[in-house]
Image (spheres, grey):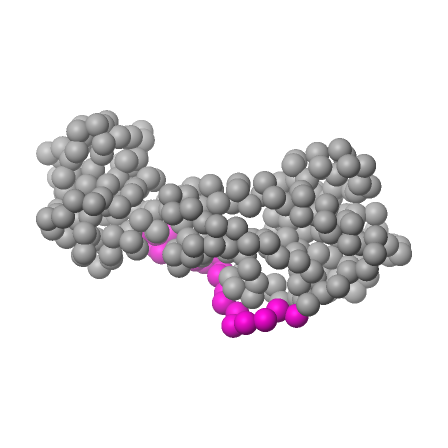
């Protein structure tokens, strides 16, 4: 029996059912009851994918549990590997299937797959892209289970990415202190949450401006902190070494503005 611990299991469940793989879905609501009632049986296997309940050491002693992790371990051990990879400017990442142990993401590796990160992707884009491959990878795991799992130790220097990376204060930008590349990476990594933001003056009042979409702007001659409005395109913001084009933003308390609609802010906006 495969016990699937997941809060986002739809595609995996469809794959298991289409391929007649016997499983039981354990969601957050069913988890506590499972832990207290589980009786070990030969051949049982646990699989964790996008599940924020703590898997106790006691359960790990009675059930082999595999974890689906969205990085090439030992890089980016922790809760937010997708966001961390984008912030770091990685050009590739991957999916690791590892044996779950008490120490966070330090178990031996069953298999890894590597994937390219496209520069235009936001965190949710990369997350969904990786999810697409999970069912087929778990199909490989099931085939290996029918023989014998062969694990390998993690090799290389580990790095860590804790959930506090997504603290709102980390998403604040100051254009005089940040490069164009860092600006864009920040916007891409923090979408959909916590969303990159800046302090601005709007109609003379201090406000927060959330930036949801941005790209490198190739034109030169934009001073750090300077704002330029481009018809039908959006808002250009000068950084310490160039400029970015913001194509979607939200003023605190207002509706989102996209593309040419952003030009409506012209004459009312300046950086704080």
Q: Position of residue 268 (x, y in %)?
A: 13, 35
Point 38% across, 43% down: residue: 120
Is residue 234 left or right of 165 when viewed as pictured? left
Q: Nearer the viewer, residue 36 or 218?
A: 218
Reply above or below: 211 against 81. Answer: above
Task: Answer yes or no: is residue 159 visible.
Answer: yes
Point 14% across, 48% down: residue: 220
When asked about the image quadrant of residue 132, the answer is: top right
Point 66% across, 70% down: residue: 153
Magenta stretch bounds: 153-172
Point 10% across, 48% down: residue: 221
Q: Position of residue 210 (x, y in %)?
A: 30, 41
When asked about the image quadrant of residue 64, the answer is: bottom right
Q: Position of residue 62 (x, y in %)?
A: 82, 61
Task: Answer yes or no: is residue 190 visible.
Answer: no
Residue 166 located within the stretch drawn in magenta: yes
Reply above or below: 270 against 101. Answer: above
Residue 155 located within the stretch drawn in magenta: yes
Is residue 204 left or right of 209 when viewed as pictured? left
């Amino acid at each position: 029996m495969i016990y699937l611990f997941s809060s986002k299991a739809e595609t995996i469940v469809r794959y298991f059912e289409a391929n007649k793989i016997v499983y039981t879905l354990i969601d957050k609501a069913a988890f506590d009851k499972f832990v207290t009632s589980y009786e070990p049986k030969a051949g049982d296997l646990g699989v964790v994918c996008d599940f924020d309940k703590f898997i106790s050491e006691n359960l790990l002693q009675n059930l082999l549990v595999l974890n689906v992790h969205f990085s090439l371990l030992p890089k980016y051990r922790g809760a937010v590997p997708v966001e961390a990879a984008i912030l770091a400017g990685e050009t590739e990442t991957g999916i690791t299937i590892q044996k779950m142990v008490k120490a966070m993401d330090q178990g031996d590796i069953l298999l890894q797959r590597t994937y390219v990160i496209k520069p235009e992707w936001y965190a949710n884009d990369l997350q969904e892209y990786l999810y697409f491959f999970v069912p087929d990878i778990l199909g490989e795991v099931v085939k290996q289970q029918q023989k014998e799992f062969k694990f390998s130790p993690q090799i290389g220097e580990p790095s860590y990415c804790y959930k506090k990376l997504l603290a709102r204060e980390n998403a604040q930008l100051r254009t005089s202190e940040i490069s164009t590349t860092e600006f864009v990476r920040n916007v891409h990594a923090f979408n959909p949450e916590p969303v990159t933001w800046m302090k601005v003056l709007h109609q003379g009042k201090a406000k927060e401006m959330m930036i949801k979409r941005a790209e490198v702007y190739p034109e030169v001659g934009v001073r750090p902190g300077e704002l330029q409005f481009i018809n039908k395109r959006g808002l250009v913001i000068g950084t310490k070494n160039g400029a970015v084009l913001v194509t979607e933003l939200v003023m605190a308390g207002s509706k989102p503005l996209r593309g040419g609609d952003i030009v409506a802010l012209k004459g009312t906006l300046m950086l704080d």
